[in-house]
Image (cartoon, grey):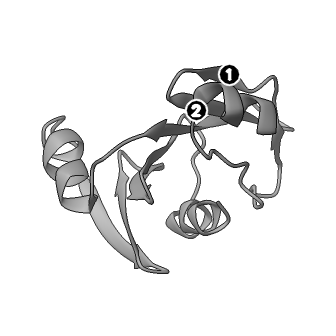
Amino acid sequence: MRVAAARAGFNASMPNYHPSGFAFSGPIDYSPGQVTISFRSNTDDRAYKVSQKASNWNSDALLSNYVVAENKQYQTYMDRGRTLFIYDGSNATWVDNGVWYQIEGDSRMTTDQLVRIAASI
């Protein structure tokens, strides 16, 4: 992860929490300004990715420029001073300290699991 973050040019980090039944599915993908970490279910075809991108957006900019602009049905959650937008059932996005985070995929995770992943980064 340190190598990917260094090559991406910002402070990306690995989630400390992943839901039961999911495991890291490497390698970590990176490019300038972006890092993507993949996870797969141990028992079926569910999967999700945690993407981190350098960004100067705040929560209001994220809401208007991505969530609303992409016509996503969303719910807003506050956790540890961060505003999380949960959309399309089991996807999430938020910004924190110059990084735009997204959890996306066909994971069928609960809102609690998404919030726990966000809190662990």
Of residue 13 and residue 113, the one placed in the foreground of this image is 13
Q: Is residue 17 left or right of residue 104?
A: right
Mark 2 sits on what residue? 9
Where 120 sits versus 61, above or below? Answer: below
Q: Is residue 44 left or right of residue 102?
A: right
Task: Report the mark closest to the observer, 2 or 1.
Answer: 2
* Position in image of residue 43 (x %, y %): 85, 37
- Tell me which corner region of the image, top left, top right, bottom left or bottom right, holds residue 8: top right
- Tell me which corner region of the image, top left, top right, bottom left or bottom right, holds residue 117: bottom right
Q: Are marks 2 and 1 in contact (CB under 8 Å)?
A: no
Q: Residues within 10 Å of mark 1 (few under 14, many from 20)?
A: some
* Position in image of residue 70 (x %, y %): 18, 34
User: Which quarter of the image is occupied by the N terminus?
Assistant: top right
User: Which quarter of the image is occupied by the C terminus?
Assistant: bottom right
Mark 1 sits on what residue? 29
Q: Is residue 83 left or right of residue 14?
A: left
Residue for point 49% across, 80% down: 80
Instruction: Classify mark 1: helix, strand or loop.
Output: strand
User: Disc 2 to disc 1, how far (Cα)?
Assistant: 13 Å
Q: Is residue 85 left or right of residue 101?
A: left
Of residue 118 and residue 21, the one placed in the foreground of this image is 118
Residue for point 44% across, 39% down: 54
- Give the numbered dot on residue 43: none
Instruction: Classify mark 2: helix, strand or loop.
Output: loop
Residue for point 29% across, 64% down: 75
Of residue 68 and residue 36, the one placed in the foreground of this image is 36
- Please name the amino acid that badge 1 sits on: Asp
Of residue 45 and residue 8, the one placed in the foreground of this image is 8
* Position in image of residue 4 (x %, y %): 72, 29
Instruction: Report whether residue 87 is seen.
Output: yes
- Please name the amino acid that badge 2 sits on: Gly
